[in-house]
Amino acid sequence: MVYPVLTIVVPCYNEEEVLPETVFQLTNVLQTLISDKLIATTSTVLFVDDGSKDATWTFIERFHASSPFITGLKLAKNAGHQSALLAGLMKAKSYSDCVVSIDADLQDDTNVIREFIVKFHEGYDIVYGIRQDRSADTFFKRATAQGFYKLMTSLGVKIHYNHADFRLMSKRTLENLEKFQEVNLFLRGMVPLLGFPSTQVYYDRKERFAGESKYPLRKMLAFAFDGITSFSVTPIRFVTLMGFLLFALSVVAGLYAIVGKILGANVTGWTSLILSVWFIGGVQLLALGLIGEYIGKIYKEVKQRPLFVIEKDLTASGQDQEAVH
Ligand code: UDP
Ligand code: MG
């Protein structure tokens, strides 16, 4: 029997503090899965160093030298979590039958990978890891995340509640994901669009093993806003709706002013005038900003700049290329 080759892709940005533990846990997972004859012996963990400023890459090289299970990809500069993850997925796609993506900080339960693989053997192409208990997250993070999922769903975006980027994807899923060619990446929104057989596995989200979150509030909000504007044009429709409403309102106000004038009422109206000017000005700027956001996205898409640049490649295929140089 031929066993599937699994690659676990781990994007890392300044993760030297957690890396040894992550390597230890993921290697264990691979070894047990191999001895239980669920995956091929050539399965590996692929760490993607997203332009870290600490010793992350040195660690990856060292682990690679001492373990056949560890490989690495070094991006030339920080590309962001989503792009780093995509870099790993696209690399792993060529030599893996299935790929599991997981964060480096061990917040997601590594033991769940086994359930992912069992589901893969049952014939599922995509297995989503769903956080059922988020009590380890702060109240604020939970509340904002909840609000985000609700908003996305109400905007008509198919997204899984409490699923981040901990999931399994089959080779054909990745091959089709590659065709998307989107520069504004929001993977957790793109994968459900593929429509392959999928299922969910629940787990408890833990606290970060060590180090600090690389997603401060500012980045988190930007990511959420990006996700919304990459997947839905409803906000622009809302601008049109607002225009209609204000127009209707202005007709009523105009009639009121004209009738008042004819009836000889003394129209003073400085307050209403100044309020309207400011209000309309504000609404217009807001609308322009929102439309500008979409234009900015189109601008980025049109340029089609590469999302990441690979500087070093420790995978077998990368080493072959090095040899040619
Ligand atoms: N990450 C990355 N590039 C970045 C920021 C983060 O590759 O620019 C990685 C990070 O090392 C981690 C994962 O993305 O493996 C998720 O980041 P983090 O755990 O800090 O986010 P949080 O769980 O707090 O949302
Ligand atoms: Mg984390």
Image: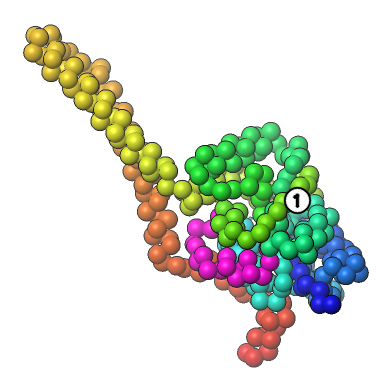
Q: Residue beneath label 1, please?
A: 201
Task: Say above or below: 27 vs 222.
Answer: below
Q: Residue 44 in the image: x percent, y percent?
A: 78, 71
Q: Residue at x 62, y 90 (%)?
A: 325
Q: Residue 76 in the image: x percent, y percent?
A: 60, 70
Q: Is 178 in the magenta?
A: yes
Left or right: 47 as drawn, with respect to 87? right
The amino acid type of the residue labelled 1 equals Val
Task: Say above or below: 282 vs 8.
Answer: above
Image quadrant in which you'd find residue 314: bottom right
Q: Which residues are magenta?
A: 166-187
Image quadrant in which you'd find residue 32: bottom right
Q: Residue 285 in the image: x percent, y percent?
A: 33, 39
Task: Say above or below: 70 vs 250.
Answer: below
Q: Nearer the viewer, residue 218 or 82?
A: 82
Left or right: 103 as drawn, with respect to 301? right
Image quadrant in which you'd find residue 165: bottom right
Residue 211 seen in the figure: no
Left or right: 11 as drawn, with respect to 257? right
Q: Nearer the viewer, residue 97 or 268?
A: 97
| Label 1: which secondary element | strand
Q: Is 42 in the magenta?
A: no
Q: Residue at x 62, y 45 (%)?
A: 216
